[in-house]
Image (cartoon, rainbow, N blue to C red):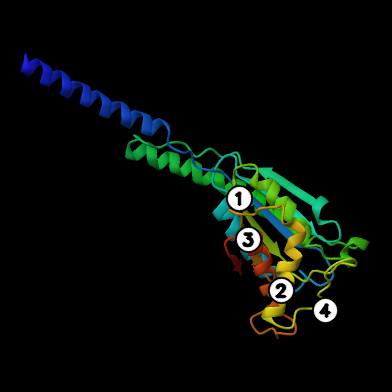
Amino acid sequence: MKKLLLNFVLAVAFFSCGTSDTETTQTQTPIRNSHTLVFFDKTQSVNVDDSFVRNKFQSALKSLIDKNIQTEGDVFEIYYIHENTAKAKVVSVSARTVKENTEGLNATDLEAAQTNYEMSIGKERKMILDMAVQKMLEKNPGASNAETNISASIPLLSNALNTKKDVKAYYFSDMVESLKNGRDFHKAAPISHDQAEDWAKKDAENYKLYNLTNAQVSIILPFAPTSSSKENNPNVTDYWKVYFEALGVNGVTEI
């Protein structure tokens, strides 16, 4: 009788372990898609006809597209930075290439699946890059190029975070905010890190209802390494780093 009871207990324990493993496998969190937002500065202070700027921007575009466009459902959007940034969406595409589950495939099938995936995703990335470069080079001769409203992008990032995707924002800009009824760095730029920090914390209060925690922000500046501090004011960059961090962003990358 004792032997039968022991066998029953062991059987129940084995079944319970098996059930737990199955449940763990079934409840694994799926890979989150990415939501990439690219902001092109279309105001007078950024000149993409300059070969250095054009090459730097194009190289950064290729790198971020290769990194973020990985599988079906990854979103890529482009906005223009100018007087009406919030309504300046010019591109919105979603990747269609499916990255199939290769678990259990033999070596031959695995190689074929990988080759098919790389060919398909490569075509999509090239299509998106060509589209992005075209928008990057597009001129903005209208009156909207007189103002630079970078802060208007904050609600756009917040809305993207609501999609539950990994949100990454890239600003191709000199980051010189210039508003008639707001901060204008052309007329008065911060003269020190402390002043930049004070201004940024104060200005971020205007968007305190928007929480950008989990968003990743990168700034791609149109300046050569030899640019003077008058042209490439480090205090302006510091302003935006503090500004985004005040809204929850965990560090801003400068490219």
| Mark 3 or 1, closer to the camera | 3
Image coords of residue 39 (percent x, y): 73, 59
| Mark 2 or 1, closer to the camera | 2
Task: Confirm or deny contact between disc 4 and disc 1 (CB under 8 A).
Answer: no
* Horizontal arrangement in the rendering, residue 139 relative to residue 132 (left or right): right
Residue 243 got which mark?
none
Image coords of residue 117 (percent x, y): 50, 42
Residue farthest along the top direction in this orientation: 1
For the C terminus, give its image quadrant. bottom right
The span from disc 4 to disc 2 (Cα, nearest Å) is: 14 Å
Instruction: Label 4, secondary structure: give it.
Output: loop
Q: Which residue lies under the disc numbered 4?
A: 188
The foreground one among 80 and 30 is 30
- Crowding near pointer 3: few (<14 within 10 Å), some, many (20+)? many
Q: Could you tell me which residue is drawn at 66 percent across and 85 percent down?
A: 226
Q: Reading the chain from its start, which is encountered first: label 4 or label 2?
A: 4
For the N terminus, give its image quadrant. top left
Q: Could you tell me which residue is drawn at 32 percent across and 30 percent down?
A: 20
Image coords of residue 137 (percent x, y): 77, 62
Relative height, residue 123 to residue 81 (above, below): above
Q: Reading the chain from its start, which is encountered first: label 4 or label 1?
A: 1
Relative height, residue 22 to residue 175 (above, below): above
Q: Which residue lies under the disc numbered 2?
A: 198
Q: Which residue lies under the disc numbered 1?
A: 125
Instruction: Label 3, secondary structure: give it.
Output: strand
Q: Which residue lies under the disc numbered 3?
A: 217
Q: Amino acid at mark 3?
A: Val
Q: Amino acid at mark 2?
A: Asp
